Image (cartoon, rainbow, N blue to C red):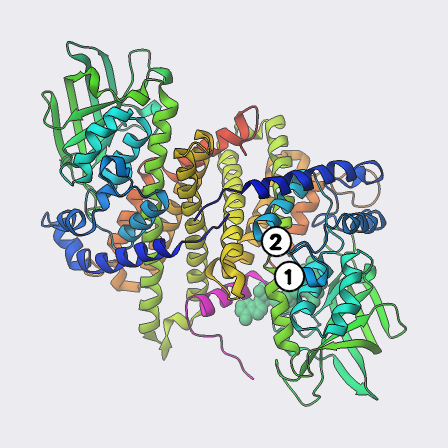
């Protein structure tokens, strides 16, 4: 047991931070909000992060979830606007967990090369996270399967080249759950970008009407139904939790920096105990979220090596997501308060953190949703989860 | 970064598990799950005997270096030890102040002679310790200590009053901070003394607590003889603070496992009495589970990285986290109990159930060892570089 970064991981973090300080500074984020971003081209061209967790046998970097979390944390610190989370965090994760060996060999090299972005869709409009909110149904079709339904809040769904769609058959049973790979320009797919409160992340509404999917595009590992799919989604939940950790930490850093500079009553406002104590609580939330995120990342690695169960992965992912989501939103809110009037302006970045945190906390299962999942484990099962 | 345990670690796990199976039974069976925080006044003699049984098995001081008679266990092994100890319902440790606080301090700052005098008795579970820091005028402002130490023909004698001294009535020894330089103020001019409790100059008076029991005491020193001074006169503050650092070390792992037992007890009740169906309580129970897991992860981080003794971020927030978590757990326990929460048992005075006792006793967690407010000051100042509090001296 050694719960700290290796030298190589420290280097990856420092490199990521240095890169993003330039590629995703405030001006870059605001340009991307206006649709003028070039971050993804730089991420794929200069850093190759899209290949991070793709195995070396599939022309990826063959790194694990700790490295994935490091990169997402750094992205969350600077509010990186790019399909990194959608493609690497959610898409590759689901493929790693559910695509068959041949499918991985066929599909992953193109992603590693930066040729295609991914989007994962499950929730229907107005629906909660989880299988109960699944918005798409499949049935046998001419080529293999036919999909129909609606998907809401698909992260970067309007720009993705390839969609991974979680669907149920008419029984709506967990065993019937499958994942299908659908080209974004397939016949019957209509996509629309939906404007959101958080302008640093694109969300899409997708309409699927009689979309034909070939047998080969059904992810092999998903044939057994929900448990494997859930594990694939949990791998993505951890990526989002890591982003939210970065957002929580940067919110604290911005608040401390600002209050040390801003003077009232003849001294920096950071000297007032009311603000010091807020900041201390923010740091507590950050450190707890940090431990939870990296524990989950280690659990993900163990899961992929067959050394942790899907239940352990689910527990760790839920703890990480609820901790980091709450830390991000509460810290961003407190940071806004600690900025006073300027915190309420469009000019200062703190509102961007506040909005990204609010959105992130709700996406891929709200904190309450994840706590309810933990409650099911500890309260409803025959055995408490351990 | 990796979490898995090696095969050697797992062998170690099997060893402690088997030892507990074979020893925590018979006369010691009633001690299972007893003697934790809020329950420290029960089975005193039996728990002292248990310390000796543990000592005979070589399970005291497992993290100490081997030249001091310890096992020099790795961090992973210590984690495993505490996990297994709690899983078996191992009783609250009578020896924790000696093993976890006095001993590491002596190992770091004591003379060879002092180490030989005190460490074996701690290792063997023969001598028990208490902590004489707080005074009526020196609480959060600990540096305001007034107790005096006077050197009389080479013998240090202590006069003054300590307060809130936990388990002083059961202790053989007290480590005391007292003023060696009569003209000094604040954290200068203090000394760190080792004082035998069984002598005419020491008077221990129990203080009845919120729970109706008396776990802490006032301790009056009147020319009490100090057997030793650790370090030099004037170094008392440095040593006293280093000791508080050990408080955040591995000893916290054992405490977490007691917390797990408490949470399990609450979950069991919730499943029985229907509280587990209440959506708000479900959220709170899940949050409690999450918080305790996070505490464990924080401790693992702290123990993986903190070997050089530097205070890392996770170490700075650790006390605030567990204290607040435990206080919340006490409130949650009461809410899960429902109407029964308010009803006392009928066997004697103020007969608290385990969870009622948890509810009341956990109010002290955010007070002792640095209140939550003091913790936040420290985090903001040392962790975040915000301006220090005004100090009028
Ligand atoms: C159960 C229990 C066991 C204990 N065991 C021991 C023991 O074995 N040995 C020992 O030496 N001591 C022990 N203590 C004492 C404990 O360490 C002190 O109670 C603690 O340090 C607080 O000091 P105080 O009680 O004087 O409170 P005060 O310092 O008077 O605090 C009163 C209030 O003021 C706040 N406050 C004080 N200073 C500041 C500040 N600068 N900024 C903001 N707020 C502030 C505090 O947070 C608190 O809310 C024990 C206490 C308890 C409750």
Seen in the picture, residue B348 relative to A13 is either above or below; the reply is: above
Which of the two discs, 2 and 1, labels the residue nearer the N terminus?
2
Residue A274 falls left or right of residue A17: right
Q: Are marks 2 and 1 in contact (CB under 8 Å)?
A: no
Is A167 one of the magenta-colored residues?
A: no
Tell me the magenta residue range.
Answer: B368-393
Is B385 one of the magenta-colored residues?
A: yes
At 76% from the left and 82% from the top, the residue drawn is B149
Q: Nearer the viewer, mark 2 or mark 1?
A: 2
Residue B50 spot, x, y in % from top left = 80, 47
Q: Nearer the viewer, residue B207 or A105?
A: A105
Residue B135 spot, x, y in % from top left = 71, 72
Residue A247 spot, x, y in % from top left = 31, 52
Q: Is mark 1 within 8 Å of ligand 1?
A: yes
Seen in the picture, residue A153 relative to B236 is either above or below; the reply is: above
Residue A225 falls left or right of residue B136: left
Residue A262 lies in quadrant: bottom left
Looking at the rendered structure, which numbered label has been put on residue B252?
Answer: 2
Q: Nearer the viewer, residue B82 or B175?
A: B82
Host chain of mark 2: B
Looking at the rendered structure, which numbered label has been put on residue B368?
Answer: 1
Q: Residues within 10 Å of mark 1 (few under 14, many from 20)?
A: some
Q: Residues within 10 Å of mark 2 (few under 14, many from 20)?
A: some
Where's ligand 1: which quadrant? bottom right
């Amino acid at each position: 047991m050694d719960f700290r970064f290796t030298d190589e991981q420290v280097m990856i973090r420092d490199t990521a931070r240095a890169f993003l300080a330039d590629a995703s500074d405030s001006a870059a984020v605001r340009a991307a909000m206006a649709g003028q971003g070039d971050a993804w081209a730089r991420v794929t061209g200069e850093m190759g992060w899209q290949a991070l967790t793709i195995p070396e046998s599939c022309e990826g970097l063959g790194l694990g979830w700790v490295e994935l979390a490091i990169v997402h944390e750094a992205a969350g610190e600077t509010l990186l606007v790019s399909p990194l989370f959608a493609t690497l965090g959610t898409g590759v994760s689901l493929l790693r967990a559910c695509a068959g060996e041949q499918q991985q060999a066929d599909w992953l090299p193109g992603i590693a090369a930066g040729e295609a972005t991914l989007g994962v869709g499950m929730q229907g409009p107005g629906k909660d996270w989880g299988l109960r909110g699944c918005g798409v149904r499949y049935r046998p079709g001419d080529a293999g399967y036919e999909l129909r339904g609606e998907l809401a809040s698909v992260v970067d769904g309007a720009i993705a080249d390839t969609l991974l769609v979680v669907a149920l058959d008419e029984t709506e049973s967990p065993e019937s759950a499958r994942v299908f790979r659908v080209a974004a320009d397939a016949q019957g797919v209509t996509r629309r970008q939906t404007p959101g409160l958080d302008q640093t992340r694109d969300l899409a509404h997708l309409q699927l009407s009689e979309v034909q999917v070939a047998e080969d595009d059904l992810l092999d590992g998903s044939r057994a139904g929900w448990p494997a799919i859930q594990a694939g989604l949990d791998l993505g939940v951890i990526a989002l939790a890591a982003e939210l950790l970065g957002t929580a930490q940067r919110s604290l850093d911005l608040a401390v920096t600002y209050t040390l500079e801003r003077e009232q009553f003849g001294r920096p406002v950071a000297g007032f105990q009311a603000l010091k104590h807020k900041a201390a609580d923010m740091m507590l939330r950050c450190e707890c979220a940090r431990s939870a995120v990296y524990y989950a990342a280690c659990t993900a690695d163990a899961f992929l090596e067959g050394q942790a169960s899907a239940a352990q992965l689910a527990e760790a992912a839920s703890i990480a997501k609820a901790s980091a989501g709450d830390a991000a939103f509460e810290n961003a809110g407190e940071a806004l308060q600690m900025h006073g009037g300027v915190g309420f302006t469009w000019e200062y970045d703190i509102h961007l953190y506040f909005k990204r945190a609010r959105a992130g906390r709700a996406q891929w299962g709200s904190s309450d949703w994840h706590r309810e999942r933990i409650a099911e484990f500890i309260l409803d099962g025959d055995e408490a989860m351990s | 970064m990796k979490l898995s345990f090696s095969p050697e670690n797992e062998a170690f796990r099997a060893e402690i598990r088997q030892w507990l199976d074979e020893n925590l039974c018979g006369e010691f069976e009633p001690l299972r799950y007893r003697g934790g925080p809020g329950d420290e006044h029960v089975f005193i003699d039996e728990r002292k005997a248990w310390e000796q049984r543990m000592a005979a098995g070589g399970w005291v001081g497992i993290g100490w270096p081997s030249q001091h008679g310890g096992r020099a266990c790795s961090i992973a092994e210590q984690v495993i030890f505490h996990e297994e100890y709690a899983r078996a319902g191992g009783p609250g440790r009578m020896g924790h102040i000696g093993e976890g606080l006095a001993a590491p301090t002596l190992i770091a700052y004591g003379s060879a002679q002092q180490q030989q005098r005190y460490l074996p008795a701690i290792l063997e579970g023969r001598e028990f310790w208490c902590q004489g820091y707080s005074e009526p005028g020196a609480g959060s402002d600990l540096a305001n200590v007034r107790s005096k130490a006077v050197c009389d023909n080479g013998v240090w004698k202590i006069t003054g009053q300590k307060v809130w001294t936990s388990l002083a009535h059961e202790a053989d020894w007290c480590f005391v901070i007292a003023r060696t330089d009569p003209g000094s103020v604040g954290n200068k001019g203090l000394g760190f003394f080792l004082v035998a409790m069984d002598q005419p100059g020491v008077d221990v008076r129990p203080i009845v607590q919120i729970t109706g029991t008396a776990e802490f005491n006032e301790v009056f020193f009147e020319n009490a003889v100090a057997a030793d001074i650790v370090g030099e006169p004037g170094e008392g503050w440095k040593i006293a603070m280093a000791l508080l650092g050990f408080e955040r070390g591995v000893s916290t792992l054992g405490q977490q496992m007691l917390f797990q037992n408490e949470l399990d007890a609450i979950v069991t009740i919730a499943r029985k009495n229907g509280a587990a169906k209440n959506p708000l309580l479900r959220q709170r129970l899940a949050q409690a589970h999450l918080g305790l897991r996070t505490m464990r992860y924080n401790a693992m981080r702290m123990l993986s990285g903190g070997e050089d003794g530097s205070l890392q971020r996770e170490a700075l927030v650790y006390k605030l986290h567990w204290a607040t978590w435990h206080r919340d757990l006490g409130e949650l326990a009461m809410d899960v109990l429902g109407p029964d929460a308010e009803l006392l048992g009928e066997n004697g005075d103020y007969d608290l159930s385990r969870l009622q006792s948890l509810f009341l006793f956990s109010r002290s967690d955010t007070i002792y060892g640095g209140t939550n407010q003091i913790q936040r000051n420290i985090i903001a100042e040392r962790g975040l570089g915000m301006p220090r509090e005004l100090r009028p001296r």
